[in-house]
């Protein structure tokens, strides 16, 4: 796992992009002796950049409250290309379309690959009421690029199945692009009163798993449940065909 670039892309807001970014960054931290570089391009909710332990760099691409200067994405690309190592880029819903347009128009994926980087797009599909919109976003992202994809299935909003009970992985939207997937990670639906509350406490404090394990504000069972969740996700990430 060296010289990889991971874009977290999904047009729908509030679906878990920052959560995926923080989990991915923690998993990758020990995969290369060089420091992991993390970026946050979200202009309204720059949550990823608030995780101090990850030393996330915020990329200011907005010229004012409503305008995005596509040229400011140059700073992100230059920063990625100037140093070797792994990179994770979290992107907000407000900058999804501008960033995708910039990456495609400037042929950035090819530039990164030509410079010796392996590029991946991580896209999230949610369950429940979010399924339709996020599935549409998955298809749009898959069609827009030829970059390898990693699918994250977020069950926080419900199981990923239609009203008829058909799973997302059984749908035409999935099957048409399944050959592009390098792997899939499921953020499993768990007991909201225990696992859910513990993860919320952790994320609200903007802490990594290692910080939680060393924090006396979390009791032994809260730490245990967080370890269970992260062990499950890390094992799934280990199985992705990087």
Image (cartoon, rainbow, N blue to C red):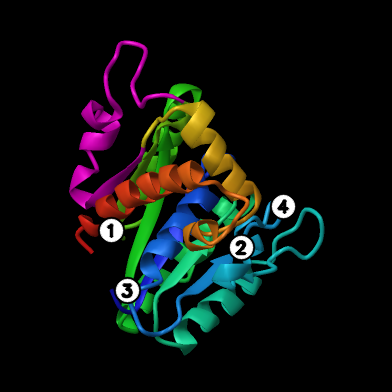
- Distance from label 3 to label 2 (Cα)? 19 Å
Q: Secondary structure at mark 2?
A: loop
Mark 1 closeness class: few <14, some 14–19, many ≥20 residues within 10 Å: some
Residue at mark 3: 31
Residue 207 at x, y percent in the picture: 58, 57
Is residue 101 in view? Answer: no
Is residue 212 in view? Answer: yes
Residue in the image at 65% along x and 52% along y? 205
- Span of residues in magenta: 158-187
Is 144 rendered above or below residue 41?
above
Q: Which of disc 1 and disc 2 is earlier in sequence?
A: 2
Q: Nearer the viewer, mark 2 or mark 1?
A: 2
- Distance from label 1 to label 3 (Cα)? 20 Å
Task: Decide if residue 170 is on the left or right side of residue 93.
Answer: left
- Distance from label 3 to label 4 (Cα)? 31 Å
Q: Secondary structure at mark 3?
A: loop
Residue at mark 1: 148
Q: Which of disc 2 and disc 3 is earlier in sequence?
A: 3
Residue in the image at 56% along x and 75% along y? 76
Q: Secondary structure at mark 1?
A: loop
Residue at mark 4: 44
Residue at mark 2: 51
Q: Which of disc 4 and disc 3 is earlier in sequence?
A: 3
* Label 2 with label 1: CB-CB less than 8 Å: no
Q: Nearer the viewer, mark 1 or mark 3?
A: 3
Q: Secondary structure at mark 4?
A: loop
Residue in the image at 44% along x and 40% along y? 137
């Amino acid at each position: 796992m060296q010289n990889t670039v991971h874009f977290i892309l999904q047009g729908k807001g509030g679906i878990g992009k920052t959560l995926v970014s923080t989990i991915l960054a923690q998993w990758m931290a020990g995969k290369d002796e060089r420091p992991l570089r993390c970026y946050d391009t979200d202009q309204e909710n720059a949550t990823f950049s608030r995780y101090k332990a990850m030393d996330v760099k915020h990329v200011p691409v907005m010229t004012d409250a409503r305008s995005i200067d596509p040229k400011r994405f140059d700073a992100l690309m230059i920063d990625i290309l100037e140093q070797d190592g792994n990179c994770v880029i979290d992107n907000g819903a407000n900058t999804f379309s501008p960033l995708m347009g910039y990456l495609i128009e400037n042929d950035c994926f090819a530039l990164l690959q030509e410079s010796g980087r392996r590029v991946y797009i991580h896209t999230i599909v949610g369950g429940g009421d979010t399924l339709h919109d996020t599935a549409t976003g998955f298809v749009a992202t898959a069609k827009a690029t030829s970059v390898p994809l990693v699918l994250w299935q977020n069950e926080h909003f419900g199981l990923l199945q239609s009203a008829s009970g058909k799973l997302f992985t059984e749908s035409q939207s999935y099957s048409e692009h399944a050959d592009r997937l390098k792997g899939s990670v499921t953020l499993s639906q768990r007991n909201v009163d225990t696992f859910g509350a513990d993860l919320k406490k952790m994320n609200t404090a903007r802490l990594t798993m290692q910080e939680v394990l060393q924090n006396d504000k979390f009791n032994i069972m809260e730490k245990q449940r967080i370890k269970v969740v992260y062990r499950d996700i890390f094992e799934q990430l280990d199985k992705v065909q990087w």
